[in-house]
């Protein structure tokens, strides 16, 4: 039974995807382009990486009702400011957000805490339901309406859990799939140790 669970865990990790969101100062003054793409879809085991390529920005989790306020009560992710002022830092600063069973079916709303950014549309979402009322377009409007200030909305947030987050580095900004041999080389010692219990 334990062996079957270990094989199932290794198989599910082999299908995990790295999803990259570029975080940079907008070249055209449109803060809705701070996060590119602004909306991504990720499944259990995937990791969303915020790749800070230019400027001094954050990737900070919020709620739909409070788009420009850190979701501290949710233990939300917060990269802190990641300066890459002239875009020459190599490797670029990265913030990773793993998608877990507990948050895979929940929108993870986020914003840039740079002064004036969120209130002018520097927001985004992981796993939004674009067929409901809490869409990316509505989130952008909510951030702009509140102008980066405290929430005045009475609508409940769809966000109820958040992933742990960690920092790593990478220069890629494309969607990538893990390769099974690479994963197995990392997981083999862990799986072996777990099998001993």
Image (cartoon, rainbow, N blue to C red):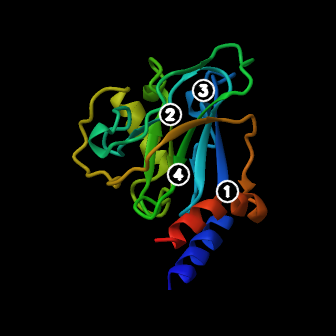
Which residue is labeled 2 in the image? 59
Residue 157 placement (x, y as % from top left): 31, 51
* Label whose residue precedes the other's in the sequence (1 or 4): 4
Which residue is labeled 3 in the image? 30
| Residue 186, numbered circle | 1
User: Which dot, 2 or 1, sits closer to the camera?
Assistant: 1
- Check disc 1 and report its element: helix, strand or loop: helix
Report the Cα–Cα distance between label 1 and label 3.
Answer: 42 Å
User: Which dot, 1 or 3, sits closer to the camera?
Assistant: 1
Residue 61 placement (x, y as % from top left): 41, 39
Q: Where, by quadrant of the figure, is residue 38 drawn?
A: top right
* Label whose residue precedes the other's in the sequence (2 or 1): 2
* Label whose residue precedes the other's in the sequence (3 or 2): 3
Q: Where, by quadrant of the figure, is residue 16 drawn?
A: bottom right
* Label whose residue precedes the other's in the sequence (4 or 3): 3
- Do callouts 3 and 2 mark residues in contact (Cβ within 8 Å)? no
Left or right, 90 with reference to 24: right
User: For the point 50% across and 47% down, which residue is it?
Assistant: 125
Left or right, 182 with reference to 64: right
Q: How many marks?
A: 4
* Label whose residue precedes the other's in the sequence (4 or 2): 2
- Do callouts 2 and 1 mark residues in contact (Cβ within 8 Å)? no
Report the Cα–Cα distance between label 2 and label 1.
Answer: 28 Å
Does residue 108 appear in the picture of this structure? yes
Residue 78 sits above or below residue 162 on the image: above
Does residue 15 appear in the picture of this structure? no
- Do callouts 1 and 3 mark residues in contact (Cβ within 8 Å)? no
User: For the point 66% across and 44% down, which residue is it?
Assistant: 20
């Amino acid at each position: 039974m334990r062996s079957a669970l270990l094989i199932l865990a290794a198989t599910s990790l082999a299908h995990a995807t790295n999803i990259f969101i570029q975080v940079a100062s907008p070249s055209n003054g449109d803060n809705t382009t701070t996060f590119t793409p602004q909306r991504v879809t990720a499944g259990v085991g995937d990791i969303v990486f915020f790749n800070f390529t230019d400027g001094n920005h954050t990737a900070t989790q919020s709620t739909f009702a409070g788009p420009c306020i850190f979701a501290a009560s949710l233990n939300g992710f917060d990269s802190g400011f990641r300066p890459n002022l002239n875009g020459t830092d190599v490797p670029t600063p990265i913030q990773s957000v793993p998608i877990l069973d507990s948050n895979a079916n929940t929108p993870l709303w986020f914003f840039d805490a740079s002064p004036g950014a969120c209130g002018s549309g520097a927001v985004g979402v992981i796993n939004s339901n674009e067929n409901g009322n809490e869409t990316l377009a509505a989130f952008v409007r909510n951030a702009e309406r509140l102008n980066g200030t405290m929430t005045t909305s009475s609508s409940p947030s769809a966000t109820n859990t958040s992933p742990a987050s960690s920092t790593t580095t990478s220069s890629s900004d494309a969607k990538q799939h893990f390769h099974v041999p690479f994963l197995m080389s990392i997981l083999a010692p862990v799986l072996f140790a777990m099998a001993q219990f």
